[in-house]
Amino acid sequence: MPAIRTRGLTKRYGAGDEAVVALEGLDLEVAEGEVFGFLGPNGAGKTTTIDLLLDFVRPSEGSATVLGYDAQDETDAVRDRVGVLPEGFDLWDRSSGYRHLEFAIDSQDGEREPDALLERVGLDRDDGRRPVGDYSKGMLQRLAMAMALAGDPDVLILDEPSGGLDPNGIRTMQEIVREEAETGTTVFFSSHILGQVAAVCDRVGILDDGELVTVDTIEGLRDAAGVGSRLVVEVAGEPGEPIGDLTAVEGVTDVSRAEDGLHVSYTDPRAKATVVHRLVESDAAVLDFDIEEATLEDLFAAFTGSDSSRETDRRAERDVRVETGGDGPALEAESEEVDR
Ligand SMILES: Nc1ncnc2c1ncn2[C@@H]1O[C@H](COP(=O)(O)OP(=O)(O)OP(=O)(O)O)[C@@H](O)[C@H]1O
């Protein structure tokens, strides 16, 4: 039995000429225990899909089940088993984080301890005792994650979970997703940030303008779209190795010269080491190199033909790497700002 199954799920807001088609004939299956990334730009229909799964809105057509329960007819059974971190949420400003968690645990018949949940999301005891009106955006997001976990859910639905989180917060969130998945929880992770989805998801569905464009693994998507990553190598002098020879390296798809250095595109990450090694062996001195990951925009451009802001996005990612001296979550945090 799939954890989530939709058939022809369609949602139109409004009627007649004014109608907005938020979701069009969604057929989707998410397996139990899977971490599924639901990717799409603003307005693609991600939140609408989640609202339909939880019966916050009614479909115009089609159906959905969660853990075998009908989303419209067996809503309580669905909500009892699902933990949700919604995109926008209201909390009681004067109540503490601890109180919110007590309430969330009670209302979901959970057995987890508020302090253990606070610790899990990186909020300490003192934070937990403060009114949430005093919390920063990132702290609120951490608390919302803890509330989603309060009932020990079988399905965890996260709608843009990284909003307001700093790099550490993003790392914590990713760790929680992995830990939950290890215990068999299905995670439905909605985001418009490819890097975050790629870091934790088994498979990804791309939604564009209410329609599911494709479902695949991240690697499968890159292969299918022919969108690889790029190595930018800053060299002093001319590389002795003719450019043509680098294109012969397995996994390399393209090599070109640009102002900031040699651009080597590849679909197989193992190609990087060979390329750098060959350049070092050549007469050129390798001064620096950088890896630019394919972005969500690249994948969208490949799958939907939509416009791409690849260069802006890539430059921003590179700047962050330089500032932080790191990669991974820091890069993702900045990409988020650029994307938003
Ligand atoms: N209550 C509503 N009334 C009218 N239109 C709506 C309503 N809710 C959503 N929409 C429209 O449906 C479409 C899909 O919106 P949705 O919020 O599902 O997208 P999303 O992928 O979650 O976007 P974001 O990443 O910005 O949250 C958008 O065109 C949006 O304007």
Image (cartoon, rainbow, N blue to C red):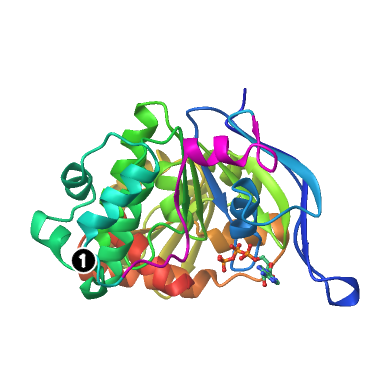
From the viewer's perspective, is residue 35 above or below residue 254? above
Q: Residue 54: horizontal and vertical position, in percent? A: 59, 48
Seen in the image, is 8 located left or right of residue 150? right
Between 146 and 166, which is closer to the camera in this rendering? Answer: 146
Residue at image coords 20%, 55%: 98
**In this picture, which residue range is highlighted in magenta?**
69-92
Between 182 and 260, which is closer to the camera in this rendering? Answer: 182
Q: Quadrant of residue 45?
A: bottom right
- Residue most extreme to the left: 126
Seen in the image, is 260 located left or right of residue 3? left
- Residue 258 visible in the displayed image: no
Q: Identify which amino acid the numbered label 1 is placed on.
A: Thr
Q: Looking at the image, in which quadrant does ligand 1 appear?
A: bottom right
- What element does badge 1 sit on? helix
Between 294 and 3, which is closer to the camera in this rendering? Answer: 3
Q: Residue 281: horizontal and vertical position, in percent? A: 28, 47
Seen in the image, is 38 located left or right of residue 240? right
- Residue most extreme to the right: 16
Quarter containing the N terminus: top right
Q: Residue 7: horizontal and vertical position, in percent? A: 76, 39
- Residue 125 visible in the displayed image: yes
Between 261 and 238, which is closer to the camera in this rendering? Answer: 261
Residue at image coords 43%, 65%: 89
Q: Residue 253: horizontal and vertical position, in percent? A: 56, 48
Residue 76 shown in magenta: yes
Q: Which residue is mark 1?
A: 324
Residue 218 shown in magenta: no
What is the crowding at mark 1: few (fewer than 14 residues within 10 Å), some, or many (at least 20)?
few
